[in-house]
Image (cartoon, coloured by chain):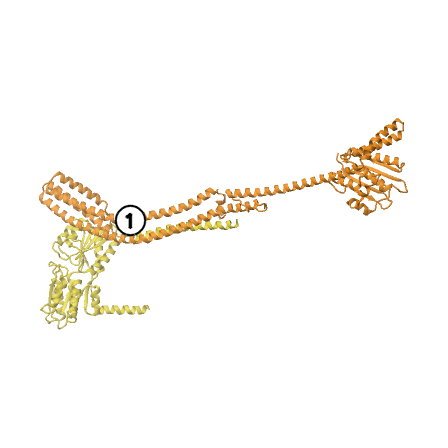
Amino acid sequence: MSKKRQGLHWQDIPLTTKVLLMVTLVTLLMFFANLILYLQVNRLTERLQQVYTSNISLTELSETLDDVHTNTYNYLLVKSSDTLESYYKSEEDYRSLLSGLNDTVTDNPVMLLEKNIRRMSESYLKETENAITYKRGRNVEKYRQSFSNAGRLYEYLNTWIDELNNRQFRNNSDSFVSLQRAVRPMAAVSTALIMVMMGVNTLMLYFMLRGIVRPLSDLATTARIVGEGNFHVKMPPTDSRDEVGVVTRTFNTMVSSLEDYMRLSRENLEKEQQMKERQLMMEASLKEAQLKYLQSQINPHFLFNSLNAGAQLAMMEDAEQTSIFVQRMADFFRYNVKKGTEDATLQEEVEAVENYIYILNVRFAGDIHFYKEIDESVLSCRVPSMILQPVVENAVTHGIRNIEWEGRIDLTVAGEDGMIRISVKDNGKGIAPEKIREILSGEDGRNEEVMPSQDSTGIGLRNVIRRLELYYEKTGLMEILSGGENQGTEVIIRIPWNT
Amino acid sequence: MKKTKRSIPVEFILMILSLALFGAFVLFVRHYYARILDAAENDSTAPYHTYSRQYEMIADSRSNTFWQAVYDRASLEAAESDAYLSLNQTGWNTDFDKLDYIDMFIAARADGIILEYNGEEGLAEKIDEAVEQGIPVVTIINDPNRTRRQSFVGVNDYQLGNAYGAEVARLADENTHNILVLSNREKELEKNQMYAQIYKAVTDAHPGQNIRVKEQNLNSRGQFDVEEAVRNIFQSAEGMPEILVCLDEVTTECAYQAMVDFNMVGEVRIIGFYTSDTILDAVQKGLIPVTIYMDADQIGTYCIEALTEYAETGRTNTYYTVDLHAMTTEDLQTAEEEELSGEVQDE
């Protein structure tokens, strides 16, 4: 992270490169440390060698000088081409050795001695050259003189070469001793330093690798927790672009997705559960309704068939009124039997109500004044079957039966604001508000009370309410209004207008 | 992960530490090896200064400290005029005499020779040979008159006679009858004029007194001859002179040592030459009443001046006179007192 400041994004480097960089760095450091050490030791060794080479070269110089002198002497002794050749060869050798000597005046005694040796050697070679020349010219006196001079210089030269050699040797011995003395602690300290460097480098490598591996192990721990079902833990967000960063971000995304998916599944499961429950309840209510019909099945079926026969008989006898009555009764029961398990159109419902009222009016000599006001447009709307007749039956049974005044029932069906409003209003005995509350909340035992009644179709208001709620998956669809005792009752059903 | 965030600087600290260690290692290795190589440095590898001319000074080893003083001064002067001066002394550690040295430096083609001329046989011819070969020669102390030497730096016998004469005259009293002058030179360099001057000075100071001035030339060639010769004088049957005049440093020191050894302090008065530590010590204690010395700095300066001038112009003064001084016990005591008072003032 601190690398960010340097512009180089350390976290963005791929792991392989990172590890490679670290190892390379450590290796390079160690390599250069060793290289430097090696070079220095090499230099020291060279220096040690150099200590003795100077002495060796001086010995060579001295030996070649001997050769020159001997060869000169030999030539002077026996003038032959062999000896002359030897002389020239040794002279050449000597000259080439001389060229390695210093030729400037310095305050360095060794170098000054070299210069003196060089210059004197040149004088010496001139004398030997003279001696050779005079010998060739058979100038006995002169070549003797020259050789004598050369001999003198030869001795001086030897003395100086010896002195130089001694000086060099003395110097070199001192150097050798001090070098030797210094090398031993050097080796120890260098080894110690290299070991410390190795230690630090290893530590560095360890920490760097730990820096790489730690997010991975954190990731592993978090993954284990997530694996145990806890979707709320996440890795802290990172913007590093290396593999670990990528894995971390992917992991976090995965955990979020898992969480969403689990929530959705749970919701779906709950919904399904609810639907199942509703269906079960619907079925149960229907079963209840059907059971009630089945209890009285014998009568309606037999009646329905008999009624059909009665109606035909009445027609044959030209008893028109009777025929219609019987026919309506037959229709009413047929509807009941047919629509018991399915939904029906509002039209069919209204017809069932009309049939029911007609039957009642025939039974009770037209006591019930039934008025209807129907919005034709909503009649095709499908509703649960057998919802209007029980309401009207309730209005008859608990409303206008046994009243002193003329009973009247108003059925209004109207579409408004996407809803269908069905109102069954009577001018009967009315219902006390507590009673209304009990009916709507299902606390009264009215259903059960109604059940034994001989005149009832057997379906109570409560059953209607429950079936409406199950059908439309909504509550508060039915409203009961009453002004109190003898003030009449209005039952209003509001259902969605779905075409 | 927070931990990781904290641990990252650790690796960078370690990286910096590692780099620092590496740097320290490099520095250490370089420094250490440089030190080793420095320690191993010697004449052949030490840094040096180059010069355009090479002068050689050839002197006896008899007056070690005196020649060293002359050489020190002369080499400083030489360095200033871009020349290097070496000191070559005859003596116990070399088989070469002055002739050999001149031969050598002719062969080695030196750029100038400063020679303490002592009248050695053949030396005058060698001087001429060197000059013929184009090597200028400056002689010091003694002047080989008949040579082609470029220049002479030193004192003449007249000066010397004056200086010694004055001191002898000062030291001589009514009991002084024998004065012995101890010289150490080749036969060629007779210094009769000097003895005459000493004689004249002392007889002038003590007219009518019977005073003899004798000269003894030790003419030593061997290493320990001077010491033996001086001791012989102290043990001679003739008896000791009252005043012993020494004309060089070694003779002075030998005479002084013999005087102390033979318990003759007070009986013999030594007039010394030069101001070595031993001689100065003796002068300060009053054991040697006076010592005559040449200005070594002047000699050194003039020698190089002559050689440089010759190298640059092709000619030079043929004669440089240096000053002669006498240092007495009183002089030294006065100087010491001055020094002491100077120190007191400083405090």
Q: Chain of mark 1?
A: A
Q: Residue furthest top?
A: A316
**Residue receiving disc 1:** A47
Residue in the foreground of this view, choosing between A302 and A93: A302
Instruction: Judge whether B169 appears above or below A444 on screen.
Output: below
Secondary structure at badge 1 equals: helix
Rendered residue at 75%/42% (across/down): A475
Using a 10 Å C-alpha cutoff, classify the residue at mark 1 as few (fewer than 14 neighbours), some (14 to 19) or many (20 or more): some
Instruction: Judge whether B233 appears above or below A82 on screen.
Output: below
Task: Answer whether residue B320 is visible to the viewer in this image.
Answer: yes
Instruction: Judge whether B321 appears above or below A145 on screen.
Output: below
Q: Position of residue B69 (x, y in %)?
A: 22, 59
In this structure image, what is the colour of chain A? orange
Q: Position of residue B344 (x, y in %)?
A: 31, 70
Residue in the foreground of this view, choosing between A131 and B235: B235
The amino acid type found where label 1 is placed reads: Arg
Task: Answer whether residue A130 is visible to the viewer in this image.
Answer: no
Residue in the foreground of this view, choosing between B241 and A118: A118
In the rendered image, the quadrant that contains the C terminus of chain B is bottom left
Q: How many marks?
A: 1
In this structure image, what is the colour of chain B? yellow
Q: Position of residue B116 (x, y in %)?
A: 17, 57
